[in-house]
Image (cartoon, rainbow, N blue to C red):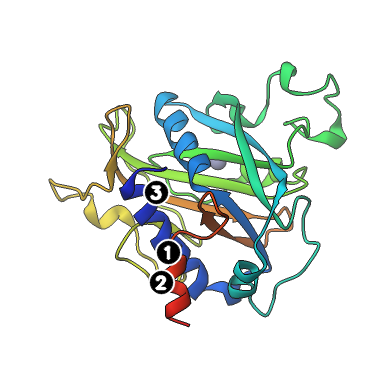
Amino acid sequence: MVDGWLAQAMAAYNAESLANKEGYRGLVMMPGETLEQILHWTLESLPDEILIGLDADNNRPHRQEVDEMFEGGDHENGLFAGEGYILGEATIVNRGDSFSVHHVPEEWTDGIFSESRGPRGGRFVHWLHTHPNAVAVPSKQDADAAQYTLGVDMILGIEFSPSGPFGWYDDTDGVRRKLQPEQVAPVRQKRGWGRWRNSPEKPVLGVAPTGHSIHGLELISFHRSGTAVNVIFVDEEGYPYGWEKFQSST
Ligand SMILES: [Zn+2]
């Protein structure tokens, strides 16, 4: 069971994923426990970014009724590897700055560090990396590294305090997807965290086991073609957080 605040944040995120389903050509489902684990590693690894490898869990296909509710008219079958299966366990593969994090240590490749496999050696189907106290918008390096991803790439932006030497950075354009209760709005409407910058008391979504206060989370997913992929957080049964509410509202 994930913490209550996180379950709430994921339900709000899912509501937004549902409201904006027409903007996406693909769909990926992440277990809430996986997000919780990744958050923990993220905070433990500060100030570094971390790189997470993920595979599809072949024993956990998407529930059909969930796919039916969340697939929009532009949905394309066969867009990426691992499609149709809930993400499996996360593995922490690397940590470093925004450049080095993509260049995985040799023990994570199978000895083949070839041009064709890219800097990450192609060991996992999906990849996620973090942007501590920065928005979840891909950099040039991120887009380059994603060219070798068979599944999808994800970026987790996390705003926390105490923030150490890193101030909050959100001076970037791009589509933002926040995990935050009570704020469900179209993705194109820009809602930066920056407006909280000057307020002495930032809202706290929850407190991590590391003692950090978490003020905001955002997660985006994209395919190497550049197309955005919708993300849904699912529980142990494979249903989205907030599922009962979604069903009664449709
Ligand atoms: Zn990045």
Give the residue drawn at x 51%, y 71%: 18
Image side of residue 130 versus residue 23, left or right? left
In space, the residues marked 2 and 1 are separated at their CA atoms by 5 Å
Q: Quadrant of the N terminus?
A: top left
Give the residue drawn at x 41%, y 60%: 11
Q: Which mark is residue 217?
A: 3
Chain-order first, disc 1 or disc 3: 3
Q: Position of residue 128 (x, y in %)?
A: 59, 41
In space, the residues marked 3 and 2 are separated at their CA atoms by 22 Å
Badge 2: residue crowd in 10 Å (few <14, some 14–19, many ≥20): few
Q: Which mark is residue 245?
A: 2
**Outermost residue toward the front in this view:** 237
Q: Circle 1 sits in a helix, a strand or a loop, which is it?
A: loop
The amino acid at mark 2 is Lys
Number of callouts: 3
In space, the residues marked 1 and 3 are separated at their CA atoms by 18 Å
Q: Position of residue 147 (x, y in %)?
A: 75, 46
Image side of residue 82 versus residue 204, left or right? right
Give the residue drawn at x 37%, y 48%: 6
Give the residue drawn at x 29%, y 54%: 194
Corner quadrant of residue 52: top right
Q: Which mark is residue 33?
A: none
Badge 3: residue crowd in 10 Å (few <14, some 14–19, many ≥20): many
Whether residue 87 is visible here, answered yes or no, is: yes
Q: Which residue is mark 1?
A: 242
CB within 8 Å, label 2 to label 1: yes
CB within 8 Å, label 1 to label 3: no
The amino acid at mark 3 is Leu
Whether residue 141 is visible here, answered yes or no, is: no
Q: Circle 3 sits in a helix, a strand or a loop, which is it?
A: strand
The amino acid at mark 1 is Gly
